[in-house]
Image (cartoon, rainbow, N blue to C red):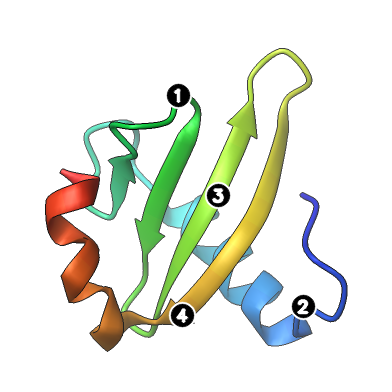
């Protein structure tokens, strides 16, 4: 996993735990970004994460993170 410079370690720990707990593509905590191939919004109880996945390299890039309660505005874009 790659992150931006200065990304808090707690955010990385939370995202790692979320990724480990996802049950697969149908999990309702993971939503594809319909405008961008390979980009997803992932939601835990506390935070939302915007990530890019590179299947050929098998890497995940954390692009942004924000408190979960403010992610409601992104519901239309994520579904």
Front-lying residue, 60 or 77: 77
Calculate the distance from the C-alpha at mark 3 to the C-alpha at mark 1: 11 Å
Q: Earlier in the sequence, mark 4 or mark 1?
A: 1
Q: Position of residue 30 (x, y in %)?
A: 32, 47
Give the position of the C terminus as an image quadrant.
top left
Q: Residue furthest right?
A: 5
Q: Is residue 61 left or right of residue 32?
A: right
Q: Is residue 42 left or right of residue 8?
A: left
Secondary element at image label 2: loop
Query: Is disc 4 in contact with disc 1, using a CB cutoff of under 8 Å?
Result: no
Q: Residues within 10 Å of mark 4 (few under 14, many from 20)?
A: some
Front-lying residue, 16 or 42: 42
Q: Earlier in the sequence, mark 3 or mark 2?
A: 2
Residue holding disc 3? 51
Q: Earlier in the sequence, mark 3 or mark 1?
A: 1
Q: Residue at x 45, y 24 (%)?
A: 37
Q: Residue at x 72, y 12 (%)?
A: 56
Q: How many marks?
A: 4
Secondary element at image label 1: loop
Front-lying residue, 9 or 22: 9
Q: Is residue 8 above or below residue 75?
A: below
Front-lying residue, 38 or 17: 38
Q: Position of residue 32 (x, y in %)?
A: 32, 37
Secondary element at image label 3: strand
Q: Residues within 10 Å of mark 3 (few under 14, many from 20)?
A: many
> Which image quadrant is residue 67 in?
bottom left
Residue holding disc 2? 7
Calculate the distance from the C-alpha at mark 2 to the C-alpha at mark 1: 24 Å
């Amino acid at each position: 996993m790659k992150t931006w410079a200065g990304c808090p370690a707690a955010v990385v720990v939370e995202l790692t735990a979320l990724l480990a707990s996802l049950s697969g593509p149908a999990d309702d905590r993971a939503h594809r970004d319909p405008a961008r191939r390979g980009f997803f919004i992932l939601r835990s109880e506390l935070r939302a994460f915007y990530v890019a996945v590179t299947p050929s390299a098998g890497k995940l890039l954390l692009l942004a993170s924000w408190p979960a309660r403010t992610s409601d505005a992104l519901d239309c874009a994520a579904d």
